Amino acid sequence: MIPKLNSSISRLTMFLILTVTAAMVLLATSPSHAKHRQAPAAAGSANAFVADKGKFRIMVNGQKIGTEEFEIGPSGNDWVAHGTSEIQSPQGSSRVKGTLNLKPDGTPIRYEWSTEGAKKASSVIVFNGVEANVELHLEGARPYTQQFTFNSPRIVVLDNNLYHQYAVLFRLYDWDKKGAQSFAVLVPQEITPGSITVESLGKQDIGGASLEELRVKTEDNEIDAFFDGPKLMRLLAPAANAEIVRE
């Protein structure tokens, strides 16, 4: 779903830092409009969103490399999930912002992201039913558009270094049905569609707290997400020795 790279930070599936060079290559090799069909998302449960605000500490190999501040709250009849991450990497520091507008059932409406570092980039994605229409802006390049088509409008948005979005995945998971459930997913900074499998592993004792665990699997990685009710508390990516902890 996302290419593997060599460093411990960049090996994190869905935890990658945007590289403008990679995006430039994509612009040179992709058609201006492409459509991709993915596996349908599982039906959602009746879980409601819960307003939440907080901060995550981003750790790799036991060392802090960044933070994310986020807020999830109502906006009229819909919901907004917003986050800002500050990341330190061998390539320097970067800031990533993302704002996701959602229907009450978790269906995405619109997503905007931007990144600042060695280069600047930003994008707006408008969801219309099963279609996602992307407009990408890269510093020093012409705007680029692309369209993805899915089999369901219930698309999971999991962007790089914006971990609060896993709380939306908690909302989409069918807790009455449980078991392994498949979802179509879009990683906006990578302009990459794909699929994930999500499964509840039940209550786990983590640091003296009883937290609900969801295991998220891609083709080449596995991430464990831990929740206190619908609130995300911790993410673990064992293969990359990475941990995201709520402060």
Image: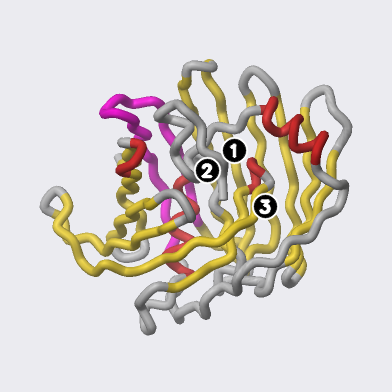
Residue 127 painted magenta: no
Counting from the top left corner in percent of width and height, residue 128 is at 77, 67
Circle nearer the N terminus (2, 3): 2
Q: Can you name the residue that lies furthest to the left here?
A: 208
Extent of the magenta region: 50-72
In the picture of the structure, the residue carrying the numbered disc 2 is 83
- Residue position for label 3: 111
- Report the side of 142 relative to 242 (left or right): right
Q: Amino acid at mark 2?
A: Gly
Tell me which residue sits at (45%, 73%) in the image. 181
Distance, label 2 to label 3, CA atoms, is 12 Å
Q: Position of residue 175 (x, y in %)?
A: 37, 77
Tell whether 221 sits left or right of 105.
left
- Amino acid type at mark 3: Tyr
Q: Residue at x 72, y 36 (%)?
A: 122
At label 3, counting other C-alpha atoms closer than 10 Å, the crowd grade (few under 14, some 14-19, many 20 or more) is many
Residue under numbered circle 1: 97
Residue at 75% across, 37% down: 26
Q: Please say whether residue 246 is visible from this viewpoint.
A: no
> How many angstroms separate mark 1 from mark 3 (CA)?
11 Å
